[in-house]
Image (tube, rainbow, N blue to C red):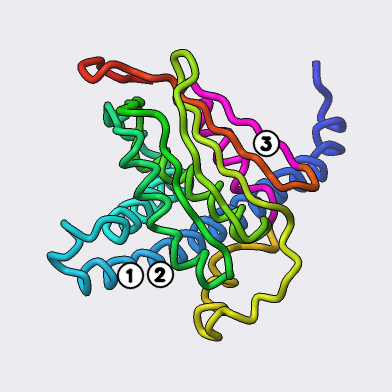
Amino acid sequence: MIELAHLVAGWPLVVTMAAAVTVQGLREGRRRSSLNEALHELRRPLQAVALASGPRLATAGAGGEAIELAAAALERLDREINGGPRPAMRGAIDGLSLAGAAVERWQEAARLAGARLELRWNAGQATVGGDRAALGQALDNLIVNAIEHGGPTIVVSARVREDRLRVAVADSGRRSRSRARQEPLAAAAIARLSGRRRHGHGLAVVRRIASEHGGVFALRRSQAGTLAVLELPLIELGERWAL
């Protein structure tokens, strides 16, 4: 039987633990509130860009898809902060249109960085399954990584290997020249958006997306450059894709 003296002696520890839990809860609440405010602030300029583009988004190619990718990223951030169901995978995706759109999206960034970005497609009508926005995000991360850290020639190539689509992003060696070619405002915006001070997140995103789609991701660095390879399972056009 617990004695009264023991209960009284234990009260300071109980109070301390309760206070710690309360403080932690308040901190988590404030953090979630701050994250939701940041999420709200991100949505506004994205909505403004979408509205300014108007009907052109339907035929804007890479520009329209960039808006969709940004919206998908915001949705994922919202789920991470506030919870909620994960959207279903979308289905069959034409590999060439997926890779071509990613290369087109980053042509201007490559030009500003003094790099040349090109697509070499040797995979025919390869079709993969899954979430187009997520796979586009994976390719974006690989291309941007090559633009920011790689050599002046960046090649996105693709071929079919057995029952997989193999997409490779290769650069021609570590960049050593100045970035003076960037316009001042563009350079500032790119620097703020790139998250260069936070290394490793982009490749972690690629690994996660590859795993979620039944694929694999490999990275190899050498003096000759970096080779990043994303392999995804091929599907038939009539095949239904699901996680």
Query: What residue is drawn where x is 53% and y is 61%?
Result: 116
Can you see residue 1? yes
Q: Position of residue 38 (x, y in %)?
A: 46, 65
Please, which residue is most extreme toward the left here? 55
Q: Secondary structure at mark 3?
A: strand
Q: Which mark is residue 41?
A: 2
Residue 5 image-quadrant placement:
top right
Is label 1 in contact with label 2 (beta carbons under 8 Å)?
Answer: yes
Query: What residue is drawn where x is 27% and y is 31%?
Result: 90
Q: Amino acid at mark 2?
A: Glu
- Identify the mark nearer the N-term, 3 or 1: 1
Read off the magenta span.
Answer: 199-221
Nearer the observer, 225 or 77: 225
| Image position of 51 (left or right of 226) | left
Q: Position of residue 102 (x, y in %)?
A: 41, 50
The verdict on residue 200 being magenta is: yes
Query: What residue is drawn where x is 34% and y is 26%?
Result: 126
Q: Which mark is residue 219?
A: 3
Q: Name the residue beneath numbered marker 1.
A: 44
Can you see residue 85? no
Q: Quadrant of the N terminus?
A: top right
Q: Position of residue 47 (x, y in %)?
A: 27, 67
Q: Dot 2: few (<14), some (14–19), or many (≥20) neighbours within 10 Å?
A: few
| Image position of 184 (left or right of 11) | left
Q: Which mark is residue 102?
A: none
Residue 52 image-quadrant placement:
bottom left
Q: How far apart are the alpha carbons under marks 1 and 2?
A: 5 Å
Q: Position of residue 129 (x, y in %)?
A: 34, 25
Q: How far apart are the alpha carbons under marks 2 and 3?
A: 35 Å
**In this rendering, the label closer to the viewer, 2 or 3:** 3
The verdict on residue 34 being magenta is: no
